[in-house]
Image (cartoon, rainbow, N blue to C red):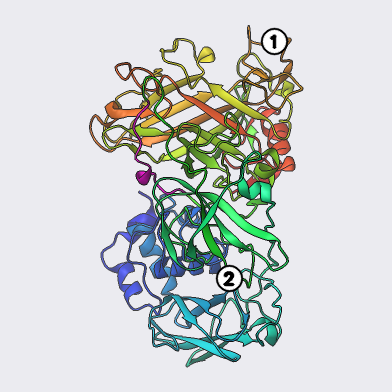
Amino acid sequence: MNTFTKKLLVSGAIFCASIVSTHAAITSVLQKGSSGSQVVELQVFLKNKGYFTDTVSGYYGSVTSLAVKAYQEANGIEVAGRVGKITAAAINAAMGSSDTQLPEIFVTTKNPTVTPGKQVAISWMSAYATSCKLPNGATAKIGVYYVRPTKTTTYSVTCTNAVGSATKEITITVVPTGTVIKPATGTGVAVGSPSAGTVATTHSAGHSAHNHYGSTTNYAPMKLAVVADADINDTAGNSVTWVTIAQEGEPYTLTGIQVVRMGTTTSDGVKRYYKRQDVGTTRCSFNWDIEKDFAFPDKDPAPGIKKVCQMRVSSKITAPAPMPMGGPDIDVAKIPPGSRGTDLENVKYTGEMPANSGDGIGAFRTVCDYSHMAFDDPIVKPGQPGAAHLHTFFGNTRTNAFSTVDSIANQGNSTCRGGIANRSSYWAPAIIDTRTGTPMAPRASNFYYKTGYNGIKPEEVKPFPAGLRILAGNPNNNRPADTSKWEDLHFGYSCIDGTDKFYGWTSEIPNCPIGSTLVMNVNFPQCWDGVNLDSPDHQSHMSYTVDRKCPATHPVPLVAITFNVDYQVKEKDAPKYWRLSSDSYDKALPSGYSAHADWFFGWKKDVTESFIKNCDQAAKDCASHMLGDGRIIF
């Protein structure tokens, strides 16, 4: 235990300071998926300290987790990416060190200019406040309220704490009925001229104010998503029917997995929609205040225009019919939510350089949070939603049956370290707890890009061609593999316990002890034919090494990719009931033989070329963040 941690555990020392703080103390465990006013407090604190660079949203996702990890590392706290008792104590103490901090208030709307009587949603959040008051009498520190102004009106939110009070105003401009309203230019409140809506902040206190955001907030221009009919319909010449299931701002509930789109057709006939698979209950909204990770991204396809959510009824996506020997039954209502990822390119220069590996191995690694699950496979079953077994996806959050080389490279958030510098998509069959049909969320995942194995010298490997797709393993396999030779093992499983004890590799899912981690490992072929980015069977354009070299039919050596996907064993003998969604063979046989994985290239060119040149080809160990040129991903 380090000195800093010991200090935090001294009874009352830290917690007393937080009690008298003018800030709202963090009193709950905060982690991915958390939301609300305490997350706002956390994000504002981390932003003021320079650890959090994203927009304050009140949602604890991957970016917030990375910021927490950076804060923990800098302050000698165990790096976990979640705010527990010790981290909360440290943050509360640091927040309590200033007695001059007034409340900070964030007020946004998607519709700063409307016609008379049009409903407008106004969202607000506050940090460092003990209470807030709105025109409608509400006193919460975070939320959304709705107004229908008949004339240009200014609304205010006032928040107070022991230091004083702060007020933020937002003006909704009302224009005559029939006026063509230009889309707002920002993702929050548009500022500048009265016609665009304004935000102003005032303070009253006995101390000078530390408002780190100033009196106005400026936002970058929004990129509208104009989607062609073919992309909306998602079919090869087949018409579909869309049924409205909710107006903007309203919740809807789905039975099974469905294709849902949100948007509108504008008066000039242009269709602006976002589309995705969805399940369960979701709010038809683009606000930050979304209810779960299946909600739509925080970008509005048609600003200033009322939108609807519609369900595609002619091509309902449900679990595929059981395969001949019967795959595991799946309760789609129990599919766990994943991470929304980030739309930021998280690459920066620090000057940190890798060391020589010392063993002739070039290594670059990355980590990606679990994104979503779907009965899709854009490589094996392109354009056929619901036609595949259930897959667990990492990386690009927009990956679905209709993903293409272009969409993978240019669309979607990323759940990977580095953000959208790595929009690659990684997926593998879901693991199902057959007792309840529950698909299991991975605890963690690691993706390796390494050289120096299988007789291929590091300096011989070439950069990945853009758009390359690789399938490793055999989803139809129903027999054990030879695990005696690691270089010949294309997939395997092992258990790792709390002491990092390694149990060896097996080709079936082992009954790992409670508290340990089950690791599913898939090794990809690294020899390319030099021509095709894919092939009819999705495998023949790639080859594993033969006699420790690339065969003449596949002469181009690439970096070797490996997936490690981890699952936590939380109860005794639980793995006895785990099966892969692709295990369609006799249930009397051990589970896991059908292990496989897919990889769809989506890296930014300069980033991937840098780690291949400076890490893999140079036989250096770049850990899971260095690019080898002084830059890191985070």
In the image, the segment drawn in magenta is 327-338
Does residue 220 belong to the magenta stretch? no
Most distant residue in the top direction: 547
**Cα–Cα span, label 1 and label 2:** 58 Å
Q: Position of residue 270 (x, y in %)?
A: 71, 61
Q: Position of residue 57 (x, y in %)?
A: 51, 66
* Residue for point 30% across, 27% down: 512
Q: Is residue 282 above or below residue 452?
A: below
Q: Position of residue 185 (x, y in %)?
A: 69, 71
Badge 2: residue crowd in 10 Å (few <14, some 14–19, many ≥20): some
Does residue 331 belong to the magenta stretch? yes
Report the front residue among 187 and 295.
Answer: 295
Q: Is residue 351 visible?
A: no
Q: Secondary structure at mark 1?
A: loop
Q: Could you tell me if the residues under marks 1 and 2 are in contact, i.e. CB atoms within 8 Å?
A: no
Report the front residue among 349 and 472.
Answer: 472
- Which disc is residue 306 wearing? 2
* Residue for point 71% across, 23% down: 461
